[in-house]
Amino acid sequence: MSDMDSLMKMPRLTVEEKFVTAGFNKDNLTTPSAKFSRVIGELATRNPLWSFVVSDIRQYNRQVQTIRVYQHGEELGYIEWDYFRGDYGFEIGNDRIKGARERTKAYHTHDEKKALAAIRKTFSPKNMSERLDKAESEVNSLLNSQHYQKNRAYNHANHTLEKHMIAYVEAVKPLFREHMVSNGHAHIIEAAEVAEVEMKTLDELSKAFGNGKASLVLKADGQYIVKTGDKVEILDDTTLPEHMKAKLGMLKLVEDEHFITNIGGRVNAEVFVLAPNDEGEMK
């Protein structure tokens, strides 16, 4: 009888349901190594309360990769046959090993005796302190996850509610304005209206500049370099169109980086952007 035959005939060795439904069972799996079988057999012989479950399989060759060890339903750890440092060997892991190691989450060795020693040392039911630590971690994880989800749900519901509130206020705006004014909050309405006008001004000017309808004006050496779409002209005070003169006159009175509705904006003392005429083009 081969090592794998002995391994697979142990009554406490089972295969996870996900592999059973895919057609894998104890009879058609293969052992990754005689070493692996000997370690599992030694553990099963010396620990009659342990159960062994095949949890990972290399499907291309039906080879067992990972076995998880349980006692009375509690997972004690896993034993995996993996490649590291130039050869295949044992990867052994559980919460105790993970907590004790800084750079890796598991213990690796090619030596059977060292693998057995690591398993005997760390595979046992959690003590009270470990159970409390795990429970605390689970609580924190659940709280954080639920807080994130509930916060998203609240923000979504609140946003939807606010949209309906705004729609209602828009329908009774005169009454709402009267309410705000009578309670000394007229400045809030004024600030909102100014912000709305400024936002729309920038939005319209940005679109007009992007599609080439607004004009870029650059003052240089007493002249005006005017670019509207792909058209570039060099003009002076006598050839500059009157509507441009009027807009520039207004923009020269404001500070840098300031915009005026239907007029344009002043970038600095030499650079201006002019809104298109009402008919949508500069003349």
Image: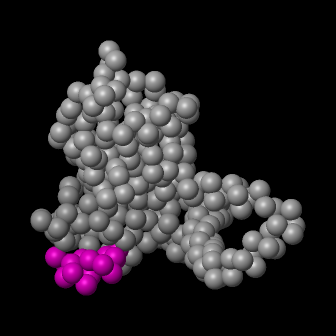
Residue 252 vertical placement versus 260 (above, below): above
Q: Which is nearer the eye, 194 or 66? A: 194
Q: Residue at x 30, y 56 (%)?
A: 280
Q: Position of residue 142 (x, y in %)?
A: 61, 66
In the image, taking residue 172 as reference, residue 74 lies left or right, namely left
Q: Is residue 18 magenta?
A: yes
Residue 49 versus residue 112 in the image, above or below: below
Q: Magenta segment range?
A: 13-28
Q: At 32% across and 46% down in the image, what residue appears?
A: 214
Report the number of discs: 0
Please indicate, yes or no, whether residue 199 appears anywhere in the rendered image. Answer: yes
Note whether 189 is above or below 8 in the view shown: above
- In this rendered view, identify the residue nearer to me: 247 or 33: 247
Q: Residue at x 36, y 40 (%)?
A: 242
**Residue 104 visible to the viewer:** no
Please identify the residue farthest to the left as the structure is shown: 61
Residue 24 shown in magenta:
yes
Percent of width and height locating residue 9:
27, 76
Q: Quadrant of the N terminus?
A: bottom left
At x 82%, y 67%, the residue is 181
Residue toward you, 263 or 202: 263
Q: Is residue 266 above or below residue 220?
A: below
User: What colour scheme does the image use?
Assistant: one colour
Looking at the rendering, which quadrant does residue 236 occupy? top left
Q: Position of residue 45 (x, y in %)?
A: 41, 65
The residue at the far top in this view is 221
- Please tell me in which quadrant of the rendered image residue 21 appears: bottom left
Query: Seen from this angle, which residue lies furthest right?
Result: 183
Q: Where residue 54 sits in the image (x, y, percent)?
A: 32, 69
